[in-house]
Image (spheres, rainbow, N blue to C red):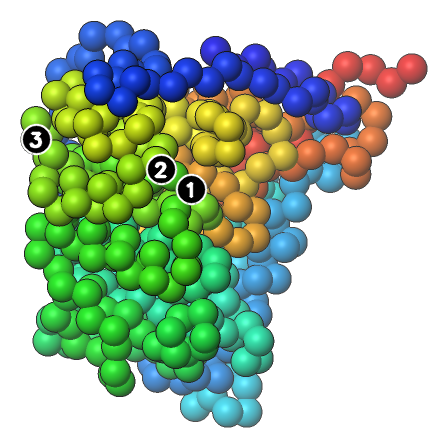
Amino acid sequence: MTPKRPINADVPAPEEKEPKATAKPARPEEKTAEKPAKPAKQPKAARKREPKPAAPKALAALVVLALAFIAAAIVFGSGGEGDQDATSPAPAPAPAPADTAEADEPVSAQTAEALGYPSFATNNTVRIGGSDPAANAAGAALAAFPSTTPEQRPSAVTIVGEDDWAGAIAASVLMSAPVRAPILFSGPEEIPEVSEEALAALDPEGSEETGEAPLFAVGRLAYPGQAVPIDSGDPASTAAQIATLRDRLFGKAPEHIVVASGSRPEFAMPAAAWAARSGDPVLYTDPGKLPAPTAAALRKHPKTPVYVLGPNEVISKDVFKEIGKVSKEVTRVSGEDAVANALAFARYRDGDFGWNVNDPGHGFVLARSDSPADAAAAAPLSASGTWGPLLLTDDAETLPPTLRSYLLDVKPGYTTDPTRAFYNHVWVIGDQAAISVSQQAEVDELAELAKIGSEE
């Protein structure tokens, strides 16, 4: 178990070292001992929400919103201040952006909400409050790429089907350098207006790093312009194609590979943030059998370490052994439910694999476990800015006890000088139907810089 870092973060903690075991090629043994898994709950049915009015087509308005959004992230995400009380103020509405000469009319709160911009922020949290993954993806993409100048725009964008959570999570690897392509969502016949407006603002033009392609499209979708097509079928086939594209664009083999569940999306969600941060591809498996496309993708890199994400009930020991017949080194990272699984991945480290977030001074992304596409929508936030792992909550109103305990464990503190302390920042993904204001406020309090001890 990784030692906890003291809450007083004035002095950096000593470097932690962990022993690393290697599984035998013929009959690999799992590195991490697991307790008997509890029966898992099936993912909750997708929440039905009333659609929000579409954003007006005003590119100048988007630019102003982007500037206002980044300003809010800087101002409200900078941690505690001075000797203020650790209890954070209630979330307050973000200031309305000013009108511009190019815009037909002032940017409304309705427009901002439709685009997924934060409806409010606190000292240590900023919400991207879209009503669906398309709106959240638009907001996250423009947060990572404000696009007020050509230098701030991505060279490419990946467009994925609105219902293709598996393709979206696998495509998150294209957000990693050198490609740096955020994700937007589309339907087969029509692209949502929030995606269309965001794409117009991002205005990708392609580059040498993207193979001169401005767009990548996962599946048959409605989108403007030409795109590099990626067939969308079963999760394993789709992910294998994306892994092949990743190898071609990156020009090198991956340092690690993550194998996730193709049937239990809530356990696969944390892989999106890591893929965007690291460039490690995500492949999928069935619970009891390794799909042929995944096995073929693993055979291309037999010496690359593989990390299986999820407990035995989600990815069986038989599958683990099948992977070991192909790959030289296999390790399991797991938690008994979706929330615990995300926390295990956030804490995990094995050499240069894993977030190893066990101390203060980090960014985090918080999303609902029953909205898997939001993991991919928010992936740019884990590969820029405050660079942090994806954490999950399973209820709109109540913060899970295990998540609360983790946030307390990494809560930042100081003894004498708060300006020299470490700070935590949390992106909250989704509207109040996904994560309530009260839960956001609780997260803010847990992330607040706290004074500890006494001055001498």
In percent of width and height, residue 288 lies at: 8, 27
Amino acid type indicated by mark 3? Lys
In the displayed structure, 38 sits above or below 290; it is above
Q: Earlier in the sequence, mark 3 or mark 1?
A: 1
Q: Give the Cα distance between marks 2 and 3.
A: 21 Å
Amino acid type indicated by mark 1? Glu
Q: Earlier in the sequence, mark 1 or mark 2?
A: 1
Label 2 near label 1: C-beta < 8 Å?
A: yes
Quadrant in the picture for residue 4: top right
Dot 1, crowdedness within 10 Å: few (<14), some or many (≥20)? some
The residue singled out by tag 2 in the image is: 304
The residue singled out by tag 1 in the image is: 255
Q: Is residue 380 visible?
A: no
Indicate which label's residue lies in the foreground, 3 or 1.
1
Q: Earlier in the sequence, mark 2 or mark 3?
A: 3
Left or right side of 308 for 163: left
Residue 126's disc number: none
Helix, strand or loop at label 1? It is loop
The residue singled out by tag 3 in the image is: 289
Amino acid type indicated by mark 2? Thr
Dot 3, crowdedness within 10 Å: few (<14), some or many (≥20)? some
